[in-house]
Image (cartoon, grey):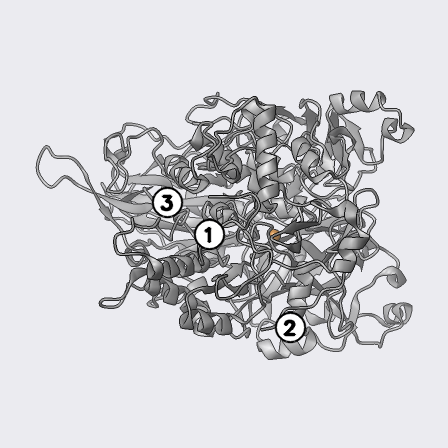
Amino acid sequence: MVVSGRKRDLAPGEVGRGDTADRLGVGPGADGMARRDFLQLGAVALAGSMAAPVETAAISGSTKAGESGTAGRQQQQGGPPSIDGLVDPAAIDAETWTEPWVWRPSDWPGQALELNVVAGENPGPSPSPGNRFASLFSYGGISPGPTIRMRGDETLRIKVRNLLGLSRFDTPIGPASDPADLPPDRYADVCRLIAERRGQKIPPDADPTACATFFFPEETALITRGPTRAGHLGGEVVNGQHGAHVTNLHTHGLHTEPNRNANGTEGDDVMLRIIPRADWEARQREAEPEARRLHAGERIGEADFEHRAGDVLRAAGRREGQPPRPQPPGTHWYHPHAHGSTHDQVSSGMAGFLVVEGDVDEAINEAMTGSRTPDPSLKTGPWDYRERLVFVQRVEVSAVDLDAGPGSRRRLVPPTAVNGVRPPAVMFVRPGAVERWRVLNGSVDGRGFKRFMVLEGQYIHENDQLWRVLPPEAEGGLRRLVPVTRQQVEEAKLPLHLLALDGITLVTIESGEAKHTIRDLSVRNAGTQHPIARPPREGEDPHRAMLRNIEDCFRDGEGISRCFNRPNEVFMWNAMRADVFFRAPAAAAGRVFTVFAQEVLVHTDNFQQRLQIAIHQQGRRRPDAPPQPSPFNPAPLDVVLAYIHVRGDPVEGGEFDVMSLRDRLPPVPPFLQPIGDDELRVSAAEAAARGVPAGSHRTRVISYSGWGSADFPLIEAPESFVRAHPELENRSWAVWDGAHIVLPPGTRSMAINSRFDLAVNGEPGAPRKFSHDDHTRPRVLAETAEEWALYNCSMMLWADTDTETDPQPGQYGAHYGSYPLSRAEGQARNARGSSFQITSKGSDHPFHIHINPMWVTRIEVPDENGRLHDILDGPVWLDTLIIPRNGGRAVFRTRFADYTGSWIHHCHILMHEDMGMMQRIDCGEDPAAADWNAKPRIASHGASGETVSAIYPPPSLEQMYRQNLGFEDPNPTTGQTYPGFEFDVPIR
Ligand SMILES: [Cu+2]
C-alpha cells in the first residue's frame, strides 16, 4: 500500500483504521477508550513488527486476551475450544467465590479508612490471589478496594493518600487533532518519528501507516506543532486526558455534602484535586509565580473526607420539628473522579462498594434468617440466605497511564473481572437456597453495557462464541462443548427478582401511596421473542438475517419494547447497580448454573455498521478469495461471571416465595417519595422573583452530543479559514489529496448544551465542553424540585463508501462526506446499494448526576422514523440513566435537598467525561438567581411521546448534526472553538 503522495487505496466498504479500532470495541463515539489504546493493543500482538497489518494483529489480540472466562487454557482457533482445564464445579471441594474485605466505621469509632493510591508501572502477575493481572492504579495494590458497609446514620471518614509520582504528560492547548486520525501522510510521519526515537528501523517496503505503536503526545506535538502545557501544571481547567496522577474521591450514590464540610474535611467534591507531592515540588521550581501557588481545591498528597450519612432532609425536619433522617439503605460505590484522569484510574480498578445498611436490609434479614443483622457473607437460616457482592468491571489490565514509561505503555484487551478476579469463580448453594446479590456494573467504557442473567447449565465464552458444557457421551469420556444460539440463551434464563436499581429500593405507587416493592422479572414481556435472537429464514444469509433483526429492534414501538425489556434479566449500563434475589430451584441438586453478562448490542450503531460492511464485502468478494473476518469482530463481549453448583440437602425452609418479602418492606421514607407535580410548581414569591407566571413549573432541557474522532465526518475547511489560520495546519485542518480537510478534534466533539429548550430558544447555539466557571452552568434553587428533559444528539451519519462512484475530495480512513438521515431512510438506501452505509455512529450516553437521585419517568428510544418510545415499565429512582442516541430522550424529576454549593452531571463513559462531557451545577438559596425555564405543563410517565414533545420540542436532524459537529471549549487557558467557521449541514 502506497501512502505518500496519493490517496490511500481504500476499497469501497473497506474499513479504515478507525473502524478497526471500532471492531475492537475501542473505537470512537460509542466507546470509552482512546485510539492510542487500540494502537498499544496492536503493539502487544505485533511484538514490534512495523509491517504487519494492524487489523490482523488486533483481531488475534482480541482472541487471545478477550473475554474468555478461563485464563491460561489452550485454545484451538476456529473450532470448539479445548475442554482441558475448564473448571468442573461439581468436582471441586470448596467455593472459589471471593469478595473484598470489609470496613465498618462503627468498628473504628472516629477513625478513618485509609486508601493509598498506588501504581505499578509495569504491572506483572498480580499480588492478589486469583488475579491474572495487577492493576496499574489501585487502592493499596488490590482491586476492587475494600467494601465499606455503614449504617445510614453514621459518619464515614476516609483518608486518601496519593503515592503516585510526577504527572509528566503534556496537554495540548487549544485546537489539537487526534494523532491517530491524521491523514495517511501525516500519520506516517508520526510513525517514522516514533520509530526513530526508539532506534527502530522501518523496512523500506513497510507500510508506515500500520505502525502499531503508542502515540507519545510529545512526539505527536512535534508533528502537529501545537502548544502544550506541562502535566504537573494541568488543573481541572483542561479537557482531554491529563493529570494522570491527580486523584480525589467520589461517593457514587451517596446524598452528602458536595463541598467542604464545616470542620474543614472534604465532602463529595470532584473539583478537589489531590496532586502528587512530586507535582508540587516540580511546581516550586517553575518561574511563573502562578505555578508556585496552591490553587483552591488543590491538596498536596493527601486529603481527609468525611460523609455524614444521617443528615437527610434536615430543612424539612426543621420545619416539622423532627431531627434529620438516616440515609436510605442502598448499594453504592466509590471511585476517583479527577477530571482528566477519571477514565484511566477507575477503569484500572480503583473502585469499591459503599453499602449503606438500614431498615430494608433488616426487614429482609429478619424474614430470611430470624436476625436483623446477620453476617451478610455467611449462609444463615432456613434458606441458607446470604448476600453476595458482585463487582463486574472491564479492567484496563496494564498501563493506560499517560505518564508511564515507554516499556510499560501497553495493554491487552480489557478482560472483565468479577471482584477483581478473572471470572468465573464458583459459588455453592443448596437446593432451595435464596441469596441477595448486590451487582455493580463498574465498567466505564462504551462496551460495558450488559444484560445480567443466570442461565441453566454451564457455559464458556471462547473463540467469540458461547458454548454449553455437556456431560461425556460415554463413560470415561470428556465433557463436550456445543455452540449455543441466542435463542437458546433466551430459553435458558432462570427467574430473578429485583429489589433495587442504583441501590435504591424500588418504589411503586399503589392507590396514590408510595410503597417499596420487589419485581418478578419473569413476567416482563414474557413469551415474546427477542428480535436479535431470531434465526435466519430458510436459505437466508446469516449476516443479512442479523442486520434485519437489528433493524427490527428499531422498527416501531413493539420492536423497541421486545428488544430492551427482556424477561429475567437486568439491563445494566455503566455505573448501574441492581440488587436481585436468586433462588436455587428445590429440585436442582447436582445442577450447574451460569451467571452471565451478555453485551447489549443495541447501545451503539457499531454492530449494525459491521453487518453492513460484511454484507458489502461479501457482495464484492471473488469466489476464490479467502474468507473475510467475521463481521461480529469483535464478537459481542459476553462474559461468564460465575458458576453456581447446587449441592447438598435441600434447605430446611422449603420453597420460598420471594415476592412475599414485599409485605415485609418498610414504608418509603420522605427522601424517596415520588416527586409530584405540585413540587415542581413555583410559589407566588418565587414566581415574582423570577418574573414568571404564578403556577409555572420548574423545567430544564439539556443535550449531550458528540462524535468520536475515528469516524468523524469528512468536511472541507473554507479557503478563507485556511488562509486566516496557517498556524492551525495539522492541528485543526490539513491538506490531503488536494483538499483542505478539517481534522477530527483530539478531545472528540463530546459536549453538553444546557440551553436546549427549543421552545424557549429555537437556535440553541453550540454545545460546550466542561469549564468550571462556564456561565451557562445550570443554577438551581435549594429545597425545590425541577423536571429535566435530556436529549442525546449523538447521531448516526450515512454516506456512499464507494468513492469511485461518489468521489469525495480528501477522503481517507473511515472519514466520509456523510449525511444526517433518519434510520429508515438510511436503511432503505443501504438496501438499494450496499456501499451506502452508516459511516459515523452515535452512542447512548449514561448520564449521571451527583448528590441527589432522579425520579426517572421516561427513557425514550427513537424508532427508525424518530418517534420516541418509553422503555420504562414505570417511574424509577436512579442516579445514572441512559439517554438513547439518535435523538433519544430521558425525563426525570429531582429535588435539591439539604445541600447548596456546586456539583456536577456528566457522562459515565468516563473517557467522554475526561474529554469535557461534564457540567457544573450551582445550587443556591436565592430564587432570583435560579435559571430554570417556566412551563405551564410538565411531562408524566403515562403521557404520549407527542405530548411530551409539545412541552420539550425534540431537535431536527439538522439541529442534531450541528450539535455534534461544533463545540465551544470555554477553558480560559486551553479553550477553542471548533471547527472555527460557519458550516452548512450537508443534505442529500
Ligand atoms: Cu458519553
x, y percentage for residue 206? 47, 34
Q: Nearer the viewer, mark 2 or mark 1?
A: 1
- From the viewer's side, name the closer residue of 76 and 7: 7
**Sequence-earlier tag: 3 or 1:** 1
Would the CB of label 1 be found within 8 Å of ligand 1? no
Q: Which residue is mark 3?
A: 595
- From the viewer's side, name the closer residue of 299 and 738: 738
Secondary structure beneath label 2: loop
375 shown above or below 730: above
x, y percentage for residue 500? 52, 53
Q: Which residue is mark 1?
A: 15
Task: Tell me which residue sits at (42%, 64%) in the image.
Answer: 563
Residue density around tag 1, few if under 14, some if 14–19, many if 20 or more, within 10 Å: many
| Amino acid type, residue under disc 3 in the picture | Val
291 shown above or below 782: above
Q: Nearer the viewer, mark 3 or mark 1?
A: 1
Q: Nearer the viewer, mark 2 or mark 3?
A: 2
